Image (cartoon, helix red, strand yellow):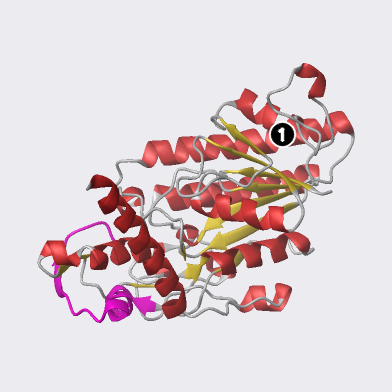
Amino acid sequence: MKTALVLGAGGFIGSHMVKRLRADGYWVRGVDLKYPEFSETEANEFVCMDLTDREVMRRVIRYGGERGNFYRSIVDKFLEPFDEIYQFAADMGGAGFIFTGDNDADIMRNSASINLNLLDEQRKFNEDKETNHTKIFYSSSACMYPEHNQLDPYNPDCSEDSAYPANPDSEYGWEKLFSERLYLSYHRNYDMPIRIARYHNIFGPESTYEGGREKAPAAICRKVINSETCNDTIEIWGDGQQTRSFLYIDECIEATRRLMESDFMGPVNIGSEEMVSINKLVDIVEAIEEKDLYRQYIEGPLGVRGRNSNNDLIREKLGWDYEMTLEEGIKKTYDWIRWQISKQIYSEV
């Protein structure tokens, strides 16, 4: 039986990856500061601890294997290394979290600490066991692309070879770019097998939809659902002409698994090429309930003017392309958020 360690397993993408790996027959250990918010974890074992603590990282890596148990005594350490490690753990969120500037120090310190701890502790474990077979996946982000290539909302350049000269529009993007180079350095110097993907706005059920860290699809779904209590008005940051592409979570997981099973290291984009304006995204959500809301445009953190995945490389290397339309994915997400909100209302009655 193959084994996998999923870091950030309490988060949106990490919890979905745990489900996929279990369905694929893996023994899975999940690690995070918190359990999944909207469903029970399917991990064989879940460790709720802080990965910025190097000793925690050492233990979750070394207490590996199907027979491992993180909470047993010291006799269980130094089992075989995991076959695969998926690194999703990071301080992250939507524009309201990333682009205000208020969270920059936490974003850079916490995320970089986790990546440094992971790579160095895995390197030491490899040396102790005289092996080097553990594949490590790192989830980077389209936020690492240069701001100057994303000023035109209808013609952004996010091909993988456009990353340099570097000029991300946020500290979140700079940290992602630094960490990409960190993983590549450990591959170059220690021959550690790594895979890197640059995610483009992943969305779907079980994602955060309120509280300040939600991304645009979930936020707009929530606002349309709650519009009756807001005088049929929806607030939109900026002028609504900024563009993005959004990829449904199941497509993201499938592409990531294909990358891990391939001999291609990356970095590679994982996203949709179906670019829409925020105004168009609102149109799509409104159409689900046949609503026509008054749009109030307000100031808010926006990020780059335009962003869209370029999938030429992933089609060439992995033969992968997205299949679900944005409308299909939004409908699934909308129905799930509406169900969550209805449960909240019912519990308060």
Tell me the residue that label 1 is attached to: 61
State the count of labels.
1
Magenta stretch: residue 294 in it? yes
| Residue ranking furthest to the top | 74
Q: Which residues are magenta?
A: 276-302
Residue flagged by tag 1: what amino acid is it?
A: Ile
Residue situated in front as seen by the camera: 187 or 236: 236
* Structural crowding at the residue carrying mark 1, measured as other residues with C-alpha within 10 Å and reported as few (<14), some (14–19) or many (≥20): many
Dot 1 falls on a residue whose secondary structure is helix
Q: Is residue 131 visible?
A: yes
Residue 224 sits above or below residue 116 on the image: below
Q: Residue at x 88, y 39 (%)?
A: 131
Measuring from the top left, give residue 82's x and y in whole percent. Answer: 78, 42
Whether residue 245 is visible: no
At which x and y percent is residue 224?
24, 68
Q: Is residue 119 above or below residue 319?
A: above
Residue at 58% across / 47% down in the picture? Answer: 179
User: Residue 27 lies in magenta, yes or no?
Assistant: no
* Image-quadrant location for residue 81: top right
